[in-house]
Image (cartoon, grey):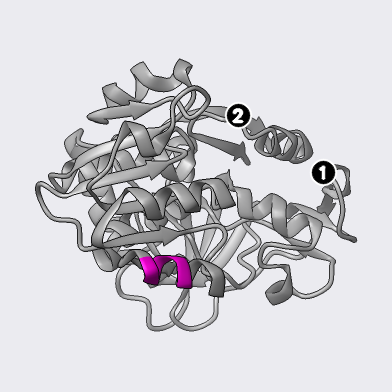
Amino acid sequence: MRAISQKEFGGPEVLQLVEVDRPEPLPTEVLVRVHAAGVNPVDAKTRTGSGVAGLLGEPPFILGWDVSGVVEAVGHGVHTLQVGDEVYGMPWFPRAASAYAEYVTAPSRHFARKPATLNHVEAAALPLAGLTAYQILTALADVQPGRRVLIHAAAGGVGHLAVQFAKALGAHVIGTASAGKHTWLRELGADEVIDYHSTSVEEATGDIDVVVDLIGSEITLGQSVKVLKPGGLLVAVPSGTSPELLETAKQAGVLVAGYLVEPDGHALTEIARLIESGAVRVEVEQAFPLTEAAEAHRRQESGRTRGKLVLQVM
């Protein structure tokens, strides 16, 4: 099968089209013919040697975790899926899933049936970003109706889905984004949008119950602590927590948590239900052919994407 592999850490140019053996499903696993694979910031970071590279080990390896495709074979013990099912998922994360390829194998419960209203390119944009946003807002923050939720980088892959999930949970949603994306974010359900280029977050808002910080800079983390109400929660996604941040939060009387997403077929089923109901939609800025994975990474690293980037495998 065709796949995109890398023999060394480095820039996008290390991503090369190769031929490798097709995997075979073990018991409880399915073989999925990949139609599309999502591109995420963690992919680019891992390509350079950071991200989750420590878990993947030294190259060569195949990047990618977001998958949408069709079940082609099932291993012994699989009861939730059958050959021909259209599925989407985020298998194995943070271990290698090797999604930049024509086939992947993974436990059947790492997948769910693809939302019927989405094509494979759209569905491939959902799993990692969607699960990150959904798990943070439900399992970690337990967002309830009336809560005030601030989302930094609200127009990004995770952010634009977090806006919609928070709104579906009944929250008052505030997002930060450049001015050109404000109208779109309001269409997605944001109640307030702050232009971080021209407006101080501390002056523009406050009394926040939950902050989802998808930037993780010293500036945004500091702003987040200041706008939270006592007992509020800051979820620091890309940067995690540090002793300094924990001490600052303690002095301010707020809570801080990092977060790492995990495979979750049940949550994917709930996300599919929200998509099919029309309550949530996914934005794909651009789909690239599998052979242009390096160009997709260059675009991802520009930091100016609206929604998600996807590799079209077939």
Amino acid at the residue labelled 2: Arg
Which corner quadrant of the image does residue 164 belong to?
top left
264 relative to 45 in the view: left or right: left
The dominant secondary structure in magenta is helix
Circle 2 — which element? loop
Residue 309 location (% of width, % of height): 57, 36
At horizontal 46% and vertical 71% (from top left) the residue drawn is: 246
In percent of the image, x 38 and y 39: which residue is there?
202
Give the residue displayed 82% in from the left and 43% down from the top. Answer: 12
Amino acid type shown at disc 1 = Pro
Q: Is residue 219 above or below residue 92?
A: above
User: In which image quadrant can residue 53 be found?
Assistant: bottom right
Q: Secondary structure at mark 1?
A: helix
Relative to 254, is 123 above or below? above
Sequence-first disc among 1 and 2: 1
Going by the image, does 16 lie left or right of 175?
Answer: right
Q: Quadrant of residue 294?
A: top right
Tell me which segment is drawn in magenta: 247-251
- 249 left or right of 40 in image: left
Where residue 23 sits in the image (x, y, percent)? 66, 69
According to the picture, the residue beneath numbered tag 1 turns out to be 12
Q: Residue furthest left?
A: 145
Number of numbered discs present? 2
Q: CA distance from mark 1 to mark 2?
A: 17 Å
Residue 130 appears in the figure = no
> Residue 34's x, y, as percent?
56, 50
Asked whether the viewer can see residue 296, the reply is yes
Q: Which residue is nearer to you in this view: 261 or 174?
A: 174
Residue placed under numbered mark 2 in the picture: 304
